[in-house]
Amino acid sequence: MSYRETPSVESDHSFHMLFFVCAVLAILGSLLAGADGSAWRWLHYLTKPTATLLLLVAVLRNARRSSSAYAMAIVIGLAFAAAGDVFLMLPGDYFLAGLVCFLLTHCAYIYALTRDARFAAHPGVFGFFAVIALLVVGGLWTSLPSAMRVPVIIYALALGAMAAQAVSRARQLSATPQQSGARQAAIGGLLFLVSDTVLAYGRFRWDIPFNALWVLGTYYAAQWFFARSTEIR
């Protein structure tokens, strides 16, 4: 029996399929929700963190089979992300709590991305992403409440560092057995950067049509690529 035919791998595929269903329902529920008590709102509440937790379980199963420090760090990042999902969807202003959770997610991902690659090995890549982070914050600056400016700066720098390290690692591991997984993680890092940028601008500056589609669509794709990167290593 080949590896792809084993029950454990088939089970992982089932987790990924359930993840896609929950992700679609979470986006649909957010787009169609009106009042907080609507059925669509409750569908969003149920499926948004569930999608992330399904990826966590799938990666955890893979980490246990491979004893991979990389995969376990991704598991920790997904756990913080699931907590952040809850804070950002709850009624009331829990944005700062959600920001802290996702900051910890990026720290966990940076740790994962340095298990087999040197941090900041390509200064030009890091310089480029530092400029992107500063431009994002600069575009938001006049719209940010004063109490949020320092947290947003810290978060943007961590997000930029995570995306930069993902791209740098993919370059370092090119032409190695790990290159496919490294490319998956790099795509995940870039999509996470897009998702959080759209989220920030949609919250603080612009009214973006179908905002949940762009934010959650890129967010779930980013998390899926990170999860996939643990399987392909």
Image (tube, rainbow, N blue to C red):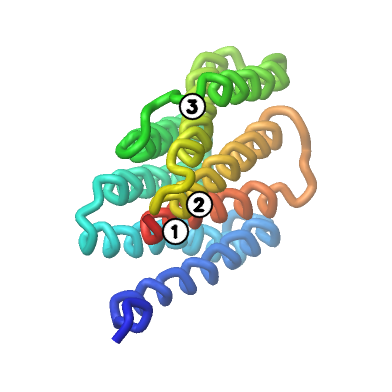
Is residue 98 visible in the rendered structure shown here? no
Residue that extends furthest to the front in the rendered view of this protein = 175
Q: Mark 3 falls on what kind of element? A: helix
Question: Element type at marker 1?
Answer: helix
Residue 168: x %, y % from top left: 49, 33
| Residue indicated by mark 2 | 184
Type of amino acid under label 3: Ala
Q: Dot 2: within a 10 Å radius of its alpha carbon, few (fewer than 14), some, or many (20 or more) residues? A: many
Q: Disc 2, disc 1: CB below 8 Å?
A: yes
Q: Residue 126, labelled with which disc? A: none
Amino acid type at mark 1: Arg
Q: Marks 2 and 1, Cα distance to the nearest angstrom?
A: 7 Å
Q: Which of disc 2 and disc 3 is earlier in sequence?
A: 3
Number of numbered discs on residues = 3
* Residue that carries the numbered disc 1 in the rendered image: 228
* Label of residue 161 in the image: 3
* Residue for point 42% across, 56% down: 227
- Residue 217 position within the rendered picture, expressed as x and y whole percent measured from the top left: 63, 54
- Is 120 situated above or below 174? above
Q: Amino acid at mark 2?
A: Gln
User: In which quarter of the view is residue 195 placed?
Assistant: top right
Q: Earlier in the sequence, mark 2 or mark 1?
A: 2
Residue 228 x/y as whole percent: 44, 58
Q: Residue at x 48, y 44 (%)?
A: 174
